Amino acid sequence: MTLRAAVGSAQAFDGREAGIQATHNALKKLGEGTPSLAIIVTSRYYDAKEVAKSINSLLGETPTIGLSSASTLTQEGQIKNSVAVALLSSPDIEATDHWLSGYAQSGRETASLLRELATVTDKEDKQILFFADGFNGDAEQMCLALTGDPLSITGGLSSGNPHTGITSQIAGIQAGSGSLAAALIEGNLKIGVGSDHGWRPVGSQFRVTRSRGFWIRTLDGRPASEAYSQLFGYPARDWGFPPLNYLVRLYPLGIDQGQDLQIRSPLRVEADGSFRMNAPIRDGVDAYLLTGSPATCLEAAQRAAQKARLSLEGAKPKLALILADISWQMLLKAHAGAEVRAVQDILGADIPIIGGYTLGQVTPGKDEAPPDFLNQHITVVVFGEEEREDDTTLTITKSTIRKKLEEE
């Protein structure tokens, strides 16, 4: 087994210093290996460009992608005002980073560019890991444009400043908002992905009577905030201002899709009472109010980790990336980092972990289906290495020699 992984994190007054310290810590833990790919999660309070430059000054040509988050997640738990850097190292993998600046303008065009990236080489064992803007852009449109494409694609949508709607993405030394940062990974790297959520319907049902683009204007013929006001008791006008206009994320809608409910979560409540979403919802559909609890969400985190580990198909986990919806941070405020411990219960306490809070995730679709765009979930991405035949032979040989020496 040649795949190695390490995670370093640091807190500092500014992003430049935090980036340098976090990278130093990761390199020290990695040891002699040369990094093949770096994954960055940075606090939304830092200047992402300064973070990217500081990390690049130490890693040089190492392909790098990253996203902004309200807090970072590592094997130590949740850390505010910090930068976390994960390094993967193996002579058997090759990665390249790519900056797609037009994501916010067209999800369909971005899908075409991702498809083009994947066709640059003829290798079959290639995968894409990406981070995109969570406020601006249509991830669902991008996913639908990839229908029938065999490409394995996994990613998360950056969270950022809820007041300005600005998030950050990083690819190499480039950083900004409205973009998609992608890493094309080829070679002997197995990626297992598992997702789940802890939100359940509570009986309240609505009809989406008027929507336009990313905005739900009315539910049951009334402004969306009035529908929630009747349920929760707060005046409708209060839902358009902090803290309720952001806490609405805790109460997503389950859209009736036949057998299963598709979860769609408001980014915020606008001053006019409409819900700002990051995926369009058509008029006339039925929606159910969903609520979650710490207990159901932590159980979901364990299920997601279990799914990710099973999808490794026997490969040994070397690094875990946790992408949890921003609602998880709100719900688990009294138990900060509990989702990390839930994942560790399944994967083990020794596995390096990096992660952050997102405004949605994208996971590989099944068969010819498009990738899935998820709200309100936790997605666990586990990186492992398939054991080669010669490695197996070597292991058996060493085991045989050791057994004979013990017998003697």
Image: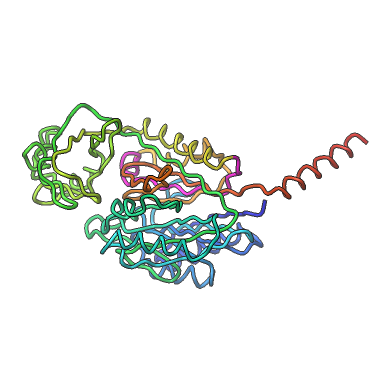
Count of marks, rendered view? 0
Q: Nearer the viewer, residue 124 or 254?
A: 124
Q: Residue at x 78, y 42 (%)?
A: 396
Say which of 319 and 340 sits in front. 319
In this rendering, is residue 338 above or below 280? above
**Residue range of the region highlighted in magenta in the rendering:** 314-333
| Vertical side of 161 occupied by 225: above or below | above
On-image quarter of the C terminus:
top right
Q: Which residue is located at x 49 percent, y 70 percent?
A: 56
| Image coordinates for residue 138, horizontal then vertical, percent | 27, 55
Residue 378, image x, y percentages: 39, 42
Residue sitting at 13 percent across and 51 percent down? Answer: 212
Asked if residue 306 lies left or right of residue 360, the reply is right
Q: Quadrant of residue 131?
A: bottom left
Magenta includes 140?
A: no
Asked if residue 106 lies left or right of residue 399, the reply is left
